[in-house]
Image (spheres, rainbow, N blue to C red):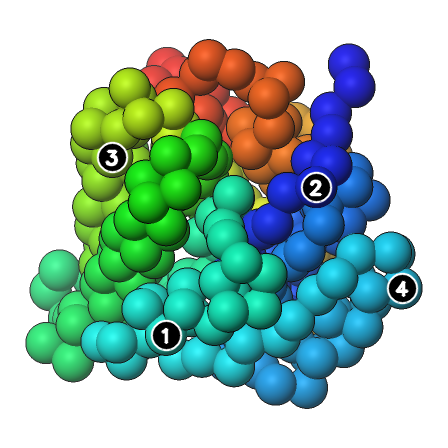
């Protein structure tokens, strides 16, 4: 299957590392004309931008804090100012702070929903507005989580925020299907991202050897890699997945609802 993004302009959040970076690299290698690298990490964001340029695509770094109410509008405005349009949007940024229903705080709830649901929703809004104004087709991929099906106790608020984005994914897909704007989501399983490495080894105190033990317990002997997610995101963004829209794909090695 020949998957190409030749000539397309993409906006990718959370692109300084992990899944977002992997998506950016996949887009550059498949021919994207321009990529807006969005992140709050200036150092890594600028490094990824240079990496994408070395692969032959134009890239621009946009420093942004998605928790800010007007961040989405400014991000899309800057991307359009640089490249003239947005053809693809990938909402890969997210916070995974731990909290249960019993011990969460209002501040944590607001932060997780601001970054994981509100910002992606308004990024979709502004990108769709650009597509509609140009009478152009477009493709959006939201990076979700297997936790939308329930989630562990300490991921209750995170899971709820991703579930909200899952519903918005399907709603936007339904609303704009006749505009030829496709919106799909990936329910990602346990993925070995830099953020997860830090969360497990430092924040949760499991030490440096947690990954080896975790991978031994997986059916395929490893966690999902950011590059695995990037391959699926590239398929969903490209015309190879036409006419799919409104799909939420479980990218996981454990079957949801399994009995054993």
Q: Position of residue 101 (x, y in %)?
A: 13, 60
Residue at image mark 2:
7
Tell me if 16 is positioned left or right of 166 in this view.
Answer: right
> Which of the two labelled residues, at mark 3 and mark 4, occupies the earlier sequence position?
4
Viewer-nearest of labels 4 and 2? 2
Q: Specify the quadrant that holds the N terminus.
A: top right
Q: Which residue is mark 3?
A: 172
Q: CA distance from mark 3 to mark 1?
A: 21 Å
Q: Residues within 10 Å of mark 2 (few under 14, many from 20)?
A: few
Q: Determine if residue 77 is in view.
A: yes
| Residue 179 image position (x, y, % from top left) | 31, 26
* 3D distance between C-alphas at marks 3 and 4: 35 Å
> Which badge, 4 or 1, comes first in the chain's sequence?
4
3 vs 1, front mark: 1
What kind of element bears circle 2?
loop
- Callout 1: 10 Å neighbours few (<14), some, many (20+)? some
> What residue sits right under mark 4 in the picture?
54
Residue in the foreground of this view, choosing between 45 and 228:
45
Q: Is residue 108 left or right of residue 218?
A: left
Sequence-first tag of 3 and 2: 2
């Amino acid at each position: 299957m020949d998957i190409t993004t030749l000539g397309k302009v993409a906006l990718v959040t959370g692109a300084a590392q992990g899944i977002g970076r992997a998506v950016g690299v996949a887009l550059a290698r498949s021919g994207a004309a321009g990529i807006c690298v969005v992140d709050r990490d200036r150092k890594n964001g600028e490094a990824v931008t240079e990496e994408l340029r070395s692969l032959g695509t134009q890239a621009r770094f946009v420093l942004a804090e998605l928790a800010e109410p007007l961040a989405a509008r400014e991000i899309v405005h800057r991307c359009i100012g640089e490249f003239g349009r947005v053809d693809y949007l990938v909402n890969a940024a997210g916070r995974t702070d731990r909290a249960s229903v019993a011990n969460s705080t209002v501040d944590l709830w607001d932060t997780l929903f601001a970054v994981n649901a509100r910002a992606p929703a308004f990024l979709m809004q502004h990108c769709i507005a650009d597509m509609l104004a140009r009478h152009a087709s477009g493709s959006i991929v939201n990076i979700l989580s297997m936790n939308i099906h329930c989630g562990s106790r300490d991921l209750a608020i995170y899971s709820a925020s991703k579930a909200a984005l899952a519903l918005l994914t399907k709603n936007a897909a339904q609303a704009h299907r006749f505009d030829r704007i496709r919106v799909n989501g990936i329910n990602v399983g346990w993925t070995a991202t830099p953020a997860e490495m830090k969360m497990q080894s430092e924040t949760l105190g499991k030490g440096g050897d947690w990954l080896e033990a975790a991978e031994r317990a997986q059916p395929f002997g490893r966690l999902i890699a950011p590059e695995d997610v990037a391959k699926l995101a590239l398929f969903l963004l490209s015309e190879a997945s036409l006419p799919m829209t409104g799909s939420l794909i479980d990218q996981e090695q454990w079957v949801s609802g399994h009995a054993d």
